[in-house]
Amino acid sequence: MTATPHTPHAPKALGSLSVSPLSLGGNVFGWTADENESFAVLDAYVAGGGNFIDTADVYSAWVPGNKGGESETVIGNWLASRGNRSDVVIATKVGAHPDYKGLSAGTIKAAVDESLTRLRTDYIDLYYTHYDDESVEVSEFLTALNDLVQAGKVREIAASNISAKRLEESLAFSAREGLARYVALQPHYNLVSRDTYEGELADVAARNGVAAVPYFALASGFLTGKYRPGTTVDSARSEGAAKHVTTDRGLRVLKALDTVAAAHEAEVATVALAWLAAQPTVAAPIASARTVSQLPALLGLADLPLTEAELKLLTEASA
């Protein structure tokens, strides 16, 4: 008897939005990828069937000389040059830009106009609160976000970096008041970071029909398989990825990924993303590509059917 393969991943619904199985992370645009490189990646992603682009107003304020908004500007220039705004789902975030920190109603309403200007569009498909701001009542920021939806500036709203308690409180407020509700959640979640989502937070999402769109889906590159004992990688994110090479769990996960990848003649990154996409509540993992050559391994998750035995092997290795 052969093991039943997990079905390859069809488009998922986030409220009224239909998104592809891989969300393309825009954090590298205007940082490690210049505008020409970014355009090439965006073109190849769409040509490969992708439609879900993730960014934030703060990307990439951490780079010396940048002030935030660089990624949105690159994406906006690309949208304008390609004339394809209606073909893609654009997600961005509010609350972490140096000039627009926090989630007060005034901050949200000022920041969204800045994002719209940089993105060269009159609407944002999915608008995230980037980090919860517990100094602000959920009633204030959800009412502000609802106002943006009513005004047509935002189609759907979502949350990132929020506790289970505040997520539940937010969903209850929206339901009680008849306001726009969070349709998606962006947690830190991958094969070497499971407790950042699994448990109470995932339970709240499942109970309320909120889809997860995990970030750090490849653990800053560790789950591509290029970080191995005794190797060094020249990458802006190598420090975050290399730490997993020194842990027992990291090495167990690499071994399991190698086993499954060999069985499918697939890239390690594809297997890691396929495992994540198969988890309860997960709609579309986020992964970024600095070059076009990095894209096929990411897009491949849509066509990689993992068996139940393979999913179990990876899950047990990552425990």
Image: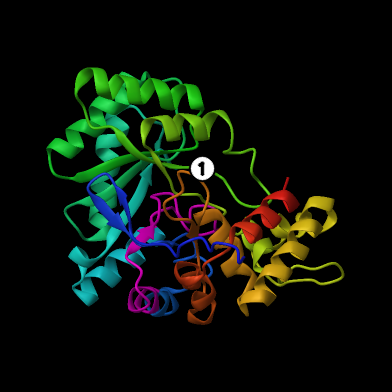
Range of the magenta residues?
Answer: 42-69
Looking at the rendered structure, the kind of residue marked 1 is Pro
**Number of dots carrying numbers:** 1
Residue drawn at point x = 45 percent, y = 54 percent: 59
Residue drawn at point x = 42 percent, y = 76 percent: 41
Q: Is residue 58 magenta?
A: yes
Q: Name the residue furthest front.
A: 1
Q: How crowded is mark 1: few (under 14 residues within 10 Å), some or many (20 or more)?
A: many
211 in relation to 21, above or below: above
Q: Is mark 1 on a helix, strand or loop?
A: loop
From the viewer's perspective, tell me whether residue 153 is left or right of residue 88.
Answer: left
Which residue is nearer to you in this view: 99 or 230?
A: 230
From the viewer's perspective, tell me whether residue 167 is left or right of residue 304.
Answer: left
Can you tell which quarter of the image residue 269 is in?
Answer: bottom right
Q: Position of residue 144 (x, y in %)?
A: 24, 29
Which residue is nearer to you in this view: 311 or 282?
A: 311
Q: Name the residue furthest right.
A: 230
- Quadrant (top left, top right, bottom left, bottom right) of the N terminus: bottom right
Which residue is nearer to you in this view: 256 or 118?
A: 256
Residue drawn at point x = 48 percent, y = 21 percent: 165
Which residue is nearer to you in this view: 31 or 248?
A: 248
Which is the main secondary structure of the residues drawn in magenta? Answer: loop
Q: Position of residue 47 (x, y in %)?
A: 34, 79
Q: Where is residue 65 in the image (x, y as percent from the top left)?
A: 50, 59
- Residue pointed to by mark 1: 187
Q: Position of residue 296 (x, y in %)?
A: 50, 78
Q: Is residue 100 magenta?
A: no
50 in relation to 136, above or below: below
Can you tell which quarter of the image residue 119 is in?
Answer: bottom left
Can you tell which quarter of the image residue 140 is in?
Answer: top left
